[in-house]
Amino acid sequence: MTAQPIVELLHPSGLHDHDPVFTLHEHGKMEIASTVKLADRDDLAAAYTPGVARICLAIADDPELLSDYTWVGGCVAVITDGSSVLGLGDIGPAAAMPVMEGKAILLKEFGGVNAVPLCLDTTDVDEFVDTVVNLGPSFGGINLEDIAAPRCFEIERRLQERLGIPVFHDDQHGTAIVALAALVNALEVTRRQVLDTTVVISGAGAAGVAIAKILYEAGVGDIRVVDRQGVIHRDRGELPPHKLEVAQLTNRNHVTGDLAAALKGADAFIGVSGGTVSERALAGMADDAIIFGLANPDPEVHPDVARRYATVVATGRSDFPNQINNVLAFPGMFRGALAVRAERITEGMKIAAANALANLVADRLAPDFIIPSALDRRGAPTVAAAVATCARRDGVARA
Amino acid sequence: MTAQPIVELLHPSGLHDHDPVFTLHEHGKMEIASTVKLADRDDLAAAYTPGVARICLAIADDPELLSDYTWVGGCVAVITDGSSVLGLGDIGPAAAMPVMEGKAILLKEFGGVNAVPLCLDTTDVDEFVDTVVNLGPSFGGINLEDIAAPRCFEIERRLQERLGIPVFHDDQHGTAIVALAALVNALEVTRRQVLDTTVVISGAGAAGVAIAKILYEAGVGDIRVVDRQGVIHRDRGELPPHKLEVAQLTNRNHVTGDLAAALKGADAFIGVSGGTVSERALAGMADDAIIFGLANPDPEVHPDVARRYATVVATGRSDFPNQINNVLAFPGMFRGALAVRAERITEGMKIAAANALANLVADRLAPDFIIPSALDRRGAPTVAAAVATCARRDGVARA
């Protein structure tokens, strides 16, 4: 029903004409669609003035109706400042837009959640937080994306304190949920108990910190987080707040030293550092080890090499078995949270999501099949159902 | 291709179940749609990682490519603070959302422009401006909506100073453009020359001020703007900035007094006050007068009454002839401005839009037909073409 565009939007310069990925991205990857008919005067009178005034007054009278009679209850903002985009680093808000659009269409495609990509022209934490708080009435949830550590932690915390809707930093929690799901099944495959397991995490950025926290909540026996200075422990001196928190939850055997020291006898390695891990260090791991090299596109250790030291190997890549891909988590997470109008996302909801994902392939488990395919359409609805149930149980569901 | 929502969003409470306007508004009036296929691994690799990284790097290298390879160049934010919604007044940002959604789908339906409704939880001018400036990289244009005067004037001015994309307050300029289009044809019908015409505007809010300015730019002979204190003139004492500006452009015969005094001998009356005008006052107008009572839903004078004193009568209502409806202007205005990547919207572009609209019915002019129907699909593309041409002429087109 859309009008024929008589005045065409400009075509790209032509520089990239022969590149199919650029052609695919011409004018972006998404659009707005009306869900109501606008063909005649009656349609206009119902969807717009004068009819719409009655909807406005009803919401003014009872703000809860905002979710009933607008798209807000089913709509998420995907927000970045462009400071830590993919593996590209700080490329700024404009250049981050293609990733935010991608995230938005994945939310729709897999979770049936509407999502609006927003790239903010500020890297000041106060300004970022104020801007998003001011946008609050427009969205049912906030997906933070590609924001550099450590300010991502503070931004998420302050937004969740000020907004009564779920705030979810996908680089942290999406990664953590899918990593936990894969780990749960890897432990099953290697006949381990969660409580007896030692996991080493390489990297103490957004993903590393969130994985450490979710593993702690899930009851993993010991966790060792390694950053550029070595294993994090309470006595290491000046730790920024997010690493101090990690130190308090992890490393109960007070291991010190480098990555190799941390890996000695460890059951599992999870790399989210973008660095590398030596074969010598991997050789020190326990028998039947588990190695997740999640840096993209270059894992911390090539899967063919990792296989020499481990029974279960996972990466972030789609061209190897066991891809740890956030898309398994965030669409269902928001779908479930929005469905029950959750005020926030609890640790329990994240763990419920991970367990639901793990369970999806429990009857077919094998070293090369510990996690559903990123394209498995059952992922999002399964996660959504688990998350919604848990939100009610945790008392954060408003409906 | 969207996943089946296994976990349904909540249905409304049921209070309004038997009201078709409420049923129509369930979960809002719009959704996001992907414009690319996401069926298999190759699709994902092109639209998301790793393919998308190359688009990001290209934009980081040349920010102009943002318009080529994202939806930003064809996407407008429809932004309010909910402080002056329809005729309902200050109902707040949440309750304003149904109107913003309506605006957004009209932009798409008539102009082929994607639009995102944003309701800001602040009425502080600085905060509003900072918030929208921070959102700058996400949009190709800003449509301000339903913001109370006088702060709407300052917000628009400051945003346009700080953003290199078109900022357009529809309650001002949309109304002004369509009113000018109708007036041009009404003058033709009553065989008047623009330069010899005296127009009285009742109301010095957003619409009244904008109409006064566009009539001045269009060369209308004399304009008298009347607010609650009477006719605005330079010596009336403490005038706020927007009324001072009006005083400088209007009332060249230094008329003082009330609306009746202003209307004495006037050729046209344009009511945008929400108030009323007495028959006694209308009786003082020139022969073959023109009366536009644009307050909605209750015109300043009922059209049946107005007809006793005027040859041409227009209202804002769809159930009377000559409906002055902004939808004739804003979709084409944005379409045209975005098509040439205009930096801003000039007075010339607004007048070009009005003339294009007027011209659309020039061959069928009659007292009851001075403006195209609000549903006339030719409106937006005609306006877009005129606006794009004028933007290039005015040197504000970036392409």
Image (cartoon, coloured by chain):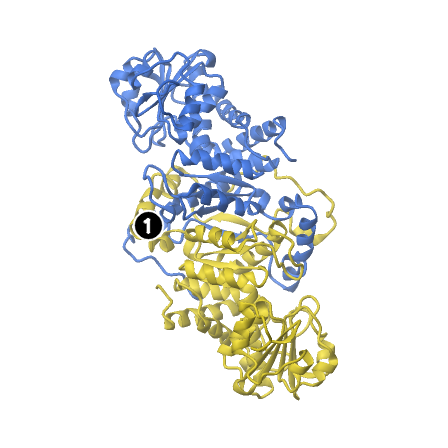
Chain colours: A blue, B yellow
Q: Position of residue B241 (x, y in %)?
A: 53, 68
Pick the residue in front: A156 or B129: B129
Mark 1 chain: B
Q: Is residue A291 visible?
A: yes
Disc 1 residue type (three-letter): Ile
Give the image location of residue A283, x and y in percent: 28, 14
Residue at 60% x, 76% y is B236
Q: Which residue is denoted by mark 1 in the rendering?
A: B59
Tell me: A269 left or right of A395: left
| Number of marks present in the image shown | 1
- B14 displayed left or right of B162: right
Image quadrant occupied by the C terminus of chain B: bottom left
Residue at disc 1, secondary structure: helix
Task: Give the left or right position of residue A399, taking residue B60 as reference.
Answer: right
Q: Could you classify mark 1 by the number of other residues whose Cα lies within 10 Å: few (under 14), some (14-19), or many (20 or more)?
A: many
Residue A105 shows in the view: no
**Looking at the image, which residue is at 51% across and 59% down?**
B155
Image position, residue B114 (x, y; %): 49, 55
Front in this rendered view, residue B145 or B284: B284
In the rendered image, residue B190, in percent from the top left (x then y), is placed at 60, 86
Along the viewing direction, whichever of A283 and B289 lies nearer the viewer: B289
